[in-house]
Amino acid sequence: MLKESLLNSFRSDVKNSSADSFPMYVNSFTNLWDYEFGSLDDLPHDVDGLVANSAIEYGLME
């Protein structure tokens, strides 16, 4: 239940975000998800893609 609520909130936030606020939403979501569940494993494909694209954009991943 908590997972679905967080995922739905994140998807909604990202959908309504601007280029400036998008990284803030990704950072906030990943921090909260990691805190609650211990890792970023098992994210749905769409959310994982958003997180990975953001990390690549900011040079955190290749």
Image (cartoon, helix red, strand yellow):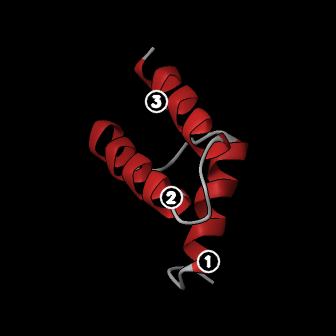
CA distance for labels 2 and 3: 17 Å
Q: Nearer the viewer, residue 41 or 16?
A: 16
Location of mark 2 (residue): 21
For disc 3, the neighbor class at 10 Å (few under 14, some 14 to 19, many from 20) is some
Where is residue 6? Give x, y as percent: 46, 30
User: Vertical placement of 48 versus 6: above or below?
Assistant: below
For disc 2, the neighbor class at 10 Å (few under 14, some 14 to 19, many from 20) is few
Location of mark 1 (residue): 56
Residue at the (62%, 78%) spot, across then down: 57
Q: Which mark is residue 6?
A: 3
Residue at the (33%, 43%) spot, across then down: 32
Element under disc 1: helix
CA distance for labels 1 and 2: 17 Å
Element under disc 2: loop
Where is residue 26? Give x, y as percent: 49, 55
Front label number (2 vs 3): 2
Q: Amino acid at mark 1?
A: Ile
Please tell me which of labels 2 and 3 falls first in the chain. 3
